[in-house]
Amino acid sequence: MKKAEQLTDSMFYIMAALTKPRHGYAIMNLIEETTKGAITIGPASMYTIIKKLLKQEWIYLHDGSDSRRKTYLLTKKGREVLEEEVQLRKLMIHLAETGLGEGE
């Protein structure tokens, strides 16, 4: 499956957080905790990205019953895009690690 564009890091983190249903605040917290504060995504950026992911049909509104705590979840298509991106990023890391190893 070929996706239209490469995911930005922020899109990648948000999609990775949405392998389980989560609302915005939980997404931001998970990313910050998982990266030990190295990555933070503010509410404005996050909701802009969520709108984009909804439009791409990579995520969907899982539960909108509480307008202040809407939860989102990856679609099947979104899961495939994320899996493809993980493989690409593994190749990037391998390239960097190989290059760094050669310098020793």
Image (cartoon, grey):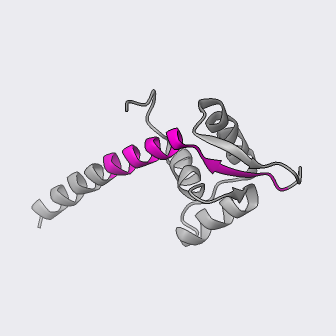
The percent position of residue 93, horizontal first and vertical second, equals 28, 56
Query: Would residue 77 be found to the left or right of residue 44 on screen?
Result: left
Query: Would residue 34 be found to the left or right of residue 25 on screen?
Result: left
Point 38% across, 30% down: residue = 2
The chief SS type of the magenta part is helix
Q: Nearer the viewer, residue 31 or 73?
A: 73
The magenta stretch spans residue 78: yes
The magenta stretch spans residue 54: no
Point 66% across, 59% down: residue = 27
Indicate the quadrant containing the C terminus: top left, top right, bottom left or bottom right. bottom left
The percent position of residue 21, horizontal first and vertical second, equals 67, 58
Residue that sits furthest to the front in the current view = 76
Residue 3, compared with residue 20, is above or below; it is above
Residue 60, compared with residue 95, is above or below; it is above
Point 58% across, 43% down: residue = 75
Image quadrant where residue 60 sits: top right
Indicate the quadrant containing the N terminus: top left, top right, bottom left or bottom right. top left
The percent position of residue 45, horizontal first and vertical second, equals 68, 45
Give the magenta part as a residue range. 69-89
Q: Nearer the viewer, residue 21 or 15?
A: 21
Query: Would residue 71 be found to the left or right of residue 68 on screen?
Result: left
Point 69% across, 59% down: residue = 22
